[in-house]
Image (cartoon, helix red, strand yellow):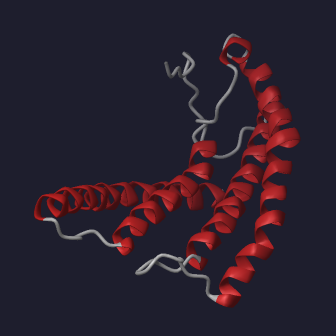
Amino acid sequence: MVADAVTEGCGWIARVLVVILIPVGFLNVFLRYVGRYTETQLVNNTWIEAQWYIYGVLFLLMFPYLLRHDGNVRVDFWYAERSERAKTRIDLVGHLVALAPFVTLAVWVSYKPVLDSWRIWEVSPDPGGLPRAPLKAMILVAFLLLGLQTIATLIRLAARLTGREIGIRERRSDAPLRIE
């Protein structure tokens, strides 16, 4: 599906952003400590904001990628021991009842503020700060991409329930992911 290819592209961009984010964050910390030692201001708002802009875009691009790779959060004690068919039903209902309306609401709520931000070319109030309009636009873009992946996932789940598997077969882990 086209949505899956776009989502895989988001994942690739996110991986590149991680590689960029690490040295930018390290540079900010290094310059801050060297600046303290030399009693000079070496870090500026451009680098600080660049770090959180990169992190923000990385975070937003991971929404559709996590959905595509079945990395969304579930209540394991209720979900893990179910059959594949029951898991598919739970996913389908959950995506229809919770995810699709949430994505629709997020796009609806963010649309006007994003347009307003571009119209006035909103910038950071901090000296040397970066423009805010592109980052705000990424909120809208990310939720549109999540919506596209939600539609693709709903189609895949419905096909799985009807016995007409389409696209790449999803690999589900036998053991639920646990973060402790």
Residue 88 placed where, x, y %? 77, 28
The residue sitting at 56% across, 31% down in the picture is: 171
**Extreme-left residue of the structure:** 38
Q: How many marks?
A: 0
Answer with left or right where residue 56 lies relative to residue 68: left
Would you identify the image quadrant in which residue 50 lies?
bottom left
Is 83 or 10 nearer to us in this picture? 10
Whether residue 9 can be seen here: no
Answer with left or right where residue 158 lies relative to residue 66: right
Residue 82 placed where, x, y %? 73, 13
Is 103 or 23 nearer to us in this picture? 23
**Extreme-front residue of the structure:** 39
The residue sitting at 74% across, 82% down in the picture is: 116
Answer with left or right where residue 99 lies relative to residue 70: right
- Name above or below for residue 24 compared with residue 179: below
The residue sitting at 58% across, 27% down in the picture is: 172
Would you identify the image quadrant in which residue 71 lies?
top right
Whether residue 179 can be seen here: yes
Residue 20 placed where, x, y %? 32, 62
Is 51 or 150 nearer to us in this picture? 51
- Name above or below for residue 75 compared with residue 64: above
In which quadrant is the N terminus drawn? bottom right
Residue 132 placed where, x, y %? 57, 76
The residue sitting at 30% across, 54% down in the picture is: 22
